[in-house]
Image (cartoon, rainbow, N blue to C red):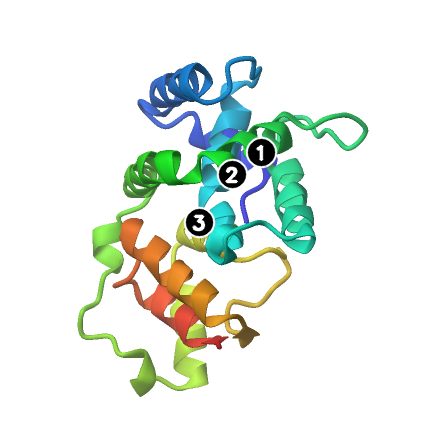
Amino acid sequence: MFTENEVSALLNYPGVLDKIENLKQNFIDEEAEFLEIEEHDFLSLILLTPSIGIALSNGSVSLFEEMALNKKARKLSKGGYWMKQDPVVFAMEHLIKGYDKWSPVYYEFIKSLMHLTVDVEALYDKSFKVEDTNESNQCIQVLKAPFIIIRFLTSFFMNDEEEDMLAVRKISKIEYDRVNEIAEQLGLSNLPIYQIYRSKLVY
């Protein structure tokens, strides 16, 4: 998943900071009137939206899911907030409550951010069929994928930065469906790297 420094780097892409400022102000005006949060941390919040969506697939966020989300939030926060309240964790409470309202907006932004930072179109391969590839070829696909697209995928769908994208994961059917729904909204469904990841999800 992304590091604090990489989130800062994303803000330097043309137009990203201005867009984040607008999204942040709208969120404060309509959802969290007294929220104080910097642009770096608000971008971190937006990048957590897919993880929040998966956590909410069962209707509410469990204690274990909350702990995992908080850990990810603190990793992305500017400066680290281990000894005091983390602004991303605090803002995340509001986003969880307003997920249905804000997620389409933030998914559209994330999608545009991915296209700004990497040539996503060049990664599409309609002829790719994950069921026709063996483990070795899947590993090659992962190694050939641009570093930043791996960062996006692991930030969205995985909790542990040490996890292997090729490892089999047991999840519920409702979580599996939510992962696919989010991937569709983000325009990731036709990426071989995503299809490989999805093939490792077992329900």
The residue at 37%/22% (across/down) is 23
The residue at 56%/17% (across/down) is 35
Q: Is residue 15 visible?
A: yes
> Closest to the observer: 13 or 202?
202
Can you name the residue that lies furthest to the front here?
A: 59
**Residue on which the image places disc 2:** 96
Q: Distance between the Cα atoms at labels 2 and 1?
A: 5 Å
Mark 1: which amino acid?
Glu
Q: Is residue 168 left or right of residue 19?
A: right
CB atoms at circles 2 and 1 under 8 Å apart? yes
> Closest to the observer: 15 or 50?
50
The residue at 40%/59% (across/down) is 178
Q: Distance between the Cα atoms at labels 1 and 3?
A: 22 Å
Q: Position of residue 109 (x, y in %)?
A: 32, 35
Q: Position of residue 71 (x, y in %)?
A: 67, 44
Q: Is residue 123 left or right of residue 56?
A: left
Q: Distance between the Cα atoms at labels 3 and 2?
A: 20 Å
**Residue on which the image places disc 3:** 152
46 in relation to 152, above or below: above
**Residue on which the image places disc 1:** 93
> Closest to the observer: 89 or 97?
97
Q: Of label 3 and label 2, which has the lower sequence position?
A: 2
> Closest to the observer: 4 or 21?
21
* Other residues around mark 2 within 10 Å, as few (<14) / some (14–19) / many (≥20): some
* Other residues around mark 1 within 10 Å, as few (<14) / some (14–19) / many (≥20): some
Disc number placed over residue 70 in the picture, else none: none
* Other residues around mark 3 within 10 Å, as few (<14) / some (14–19) / many (≥20): some
